[in-house]
Image: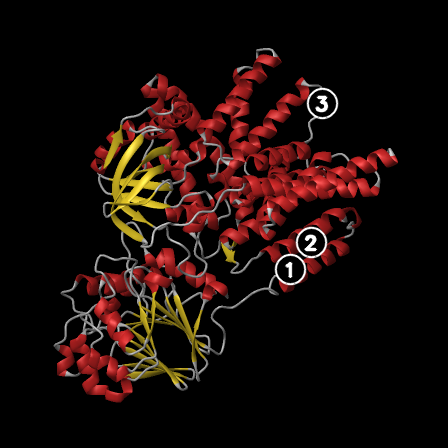
Amino acid sequence: MNDYPLIKFVLLFICGLILQSILSILLIPLVISFSGSLLLIFLLYFISRRKETFFNLLLISISVVLYGMIHFSIYKNVRVTFPFELPVNKNALIFGTITDINLIREDKVVFQIETDSVRLNKKTAAGSINLVCSVKDSRKNLEKFYSSILIGNRLAVKGTLSRPRNQRNPGEFDYESALAENGIHGLIYVYKTGDVSILPGESSVLKNIPFELRKSIDGLITKYHNNSTTALLRGLLLADRSMIDYDIRTEFINSGVVHVLAVSGLHVGFVVLIFVVLFKRFNPYVRYGFTILGLLLFMVITNYPTSVVRATIMALVMIASPLTGRNYNSINSLSFAALIILLLNPSDLFSPGFQLSFSAVLSIVLLYPPIASRIAKMKIKSSALRYILLFCAVSFAAQIGTLPFTLFYFHKLSVIALIANFIVIPMIGMIVGLGIFTIFTGSILSILGMISGSANELLSFILFSIVRFFGNENYSFIFIRQFSLYDSLIFYGIVTVIFLFRNYLVSLKSRIIAVVLSILIMSIGFTLDNRELLKENILSVYLIDIGQGDAILIKFPNGKTALIDGGDATETFDNGSRVIIPLLEHLGINKIDYGFITHADADHYRGYISLIKNNRIWQICIPVPNFSEPGDIEIEDVIKTHRVPVKYFGKSMMPVGNVRLYILNDTLCHEFKNLSMNDKSGVFKLVYGKTSFLFTGDAGIKAENFYIGNYGGFLKSDVLKVGHHGSKTSTGEKFLDAVKPDYALISAGVMNKFRHPSPEIIQQLNNREIEIYRTDLSGGILFQSDGYQIKNINWKKE
């Protein structure tokens, strides 16, 4: 560590940032403590006349930590909150200034705006806040609008002002918190470009230079490539991954190569290589000067992502070292890069980009040399084999360093990453190089741009095919449900011990013992802080928040699972793949034992399609199909195509361990046959010990009267899933008097267009002092029963 003085300072500085993020100590006591420590250092120095006494070093360390705490207090991003009472405010009128513009997407233009005022219902509701504005329209109108706006323009915007989606279900990404950490208060959606007016005023010329440059490069990328290749090159060259398909991104994660989609040191290396080759005949000062300008330009056009800033600073230090007569040291340059970034924005320390970038490089710097030394001692004659082993060593070192962060953010341990990276990284290099070539040549001569663009489309197609093969979820990764900071400390602790004592592990026996002990410690240590949300020997009923629709997950005391409905799936958002499957993975549920679809309305069955296609359902129970209904036809085709065992609703009782599940639909009754599709919804009653739950799908009052007449007092239940999302066409007073629930569950979208739940239904429930739980207000809702009593569980605090 004596050779790396800067890393000591940076590590202590980082400790200060972390401590202050946890403790949030007031600034004044920190400043007083920091001033006192500096005064003591000064006094001790003059008393002892020695710089490196123990107390001096201790006080210096404390001072650096305190400075880190002060710096975090002063410069951290201010977390903001949505300042309006209603989560959705239609017909909002805002006036403000554009502060940033994203690259145009296929169906929308997105920019940030700092408001002067916000008017709701013709009344001023807020002053200066920051919003992300999303404008949708036809492609022609969007392109015209996109070409007319600039950073610094003052605008008047009419649209729907919304609160960002927070964590609605366990394991979900909290979009609201992510925006709030960056000072964004909310979102505004505009559905035609005519609702945005540019007001008189000057735009910022300086701020628009990078934006116009990015726009021009993006225009050339789009001109010469198809949509999939354009989306990839945008991510690789402009650090904009917004157009990359969700499924493709998932396949990159599964195969352990998602890091190549982020602009990083690999791309900075290409820039250095290009400029060194272009100017190799010039004297070093000219060559290095142009290279530095190229690096700074690349950092600007990529919009300053942390990985690029880190790689650029390290490259600049590397270039400057021979010019200043100093030796380059990768650890010191990495420390310097971290210090610069954190001085500019201490909150970057807690961003995935910073963590993954720095942990990867640090791990390569520390672990690659000893591994490469071992390979050199093997005296391999084949240069190709030696190259393969060295490449794998770099990839292995990077994966070791980033593994805790990868598991924490993605919960997937790729078992195929080494092989995938060996093939994918060189291909990414070729695609990046060819992409840069296309931009330069295409700007001069279109035919050259078309030829090289077509070649890159072929390369991209091959890349996506390879990643799709490696990213197959059947064999590409092991899902790690729970990985915490505590687990990360155990992992890094073990790696550090092995690294420090590696010279003592000379025999095969000692290495085997070290590996076995490491695996044993990790396998035990990683489970110590695990918490099971859906506990064993308990009946858990979880109302999934899937917006406007129904999806209810049940875990029985014997571990079996059921899912009643699966929400909707549209072209833009599939609740099955985007909400339910991630939830199942988070909860450790591989497949649903009993699938139930109450009826073939889109908001109840379409999410099931991706569940069936992804082999997540053992068997399924649905109503007798009506082949004049498109929904019935679609779900029947999917079930038959994927050969899922199917049963049709009929009056019956199904025991699941010591829980009884009653299907109340009497399909043989003439009166039942004459009901509408909604009224024929599957109606189920769960009985566990002295507790019970009643689920009614979209059954209306006519169906409720049928069930009252046929079941009477048997309908009485502790918990009622209110019919048809709280519509006034369901949950009649007679039905409530028959069920007599203590709790009512309502599944509805936030401020949905149907205005569910109906105020009349809410009033009826309140009149009977029934506790109401709503997904539109609370997100997902969890109830658990031990057979004697039912409890509502706050899963966010579990």
Mark positioned earlier in the residue sequence (3 or 1): 3
Mark positioned earlier in the residue sequence (2 or 1): 2
| Residue found at the very far bottom of the displayed protein | 713
Residue indicated by mark 1? 522
| Residue found at the very far right of the displayed protein | 48
Mark positioned earlier in the residue sequence (2 or 3): 3
Q: Position of residue 734 (x, y in %)?
A: 20, 81
- Give the label, 2 or 3, closer to the camera: 3
For the residue labelled by badge 3, is the local secondary structure a helix, a strand or a loop? loop
Residue indicated by mark 2? 494
Q: Amino acid at mark 3?
A: Arg
Contact (CB < 8 A) between labels 2 and 1? Answer: yes
For the residue labelled by badge 2, is the local secondary structure a helix, a strand or a loop? helix
Where 791 falls versus 73 (above or below)?
below
Judging depth in this view, the residue of 117 and 597 nearest the camera is: 117
Left or right of residue 527: residue 465: left
Alpha-carbon distance for marks 3 and 1? 42 Å
Residue indicated by mark 3? 326
**Quarter where residue 674 is shown:** bottom left
Q: Amino acid at mark 1?
A: Met
- Give the label, 3 or 1, closer to the camera: 3
Q: Position of residue 607 (x, y in %)?
A: 31, 60
Contact (CB < 8 A) between labels 2 and 3? Answer: no
Left or right of residue 490: residue 717: left
* Residue at point 50%, 42% (across, down): 77
